[in-house]
Amino acid sequence: MEANKAYFMVRAEVPNESDRAKFDQWYGTHHLPLAMDKFRAEKGWRFWSRSDPSVHYALYQFSDMATLRDCLESPAFKLLIADFDQAWPRVARSRDLIEAVQAA
């Protein structure tokens, strides 16, 4: 992470173990590339929790909070939500906007 950058974090819970490989493949080959294109994020990462194997995180880096907020108000963001909801209607998500204030 870089100081003074804005980050958009999405936490998704994939409770059914049998869905996780399919979700992982879909997110990696479809949703992350689509999000990077539509968000115009500087960088993007995906993570699986090792504390709770049902939890998947995605993190997108933006130049600043204003750019991130503009992205989240765009029609492209609504498209991404609809795309996710159609493919994974039972996967609960939460979103957070975070700002790096210090890097060591």
Image (cartoon, rainbow, N blue to C red):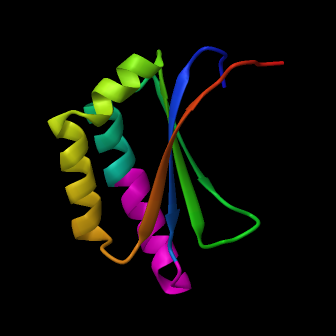
Residue in view at x 52 percent, y 31 percent? 7
Quadrant, the N terminus: top right
List x then y, in percent, for residue 86: 22, 68
User: Magenta residues?
Assistant: 15-29
- Residue 3 relative to residue 42: left or right: right
List x then y, in percent, for residue 32: 39, 46
- Residue 86 relative to residue 71: left or right: left
Overall secondary structure of the magenta section: helix
Closer to us: 61 or 100: 100
Residue in view at x 77 percent, y 19 percent? 103
Residue in view at x 65 percent, y 24 percent? 100
Residue in view at x 29 percent, y 25 percent? 70
Quadrant, the C terminus: top right
Q: Is residue 74 above or below residue 29?
A: above
Q: Is residue 85 above or below residue 14?
A: above
Closer to us: 9 or 88: 9
Q: Does the magenta stretch include residue 25?
A: yes
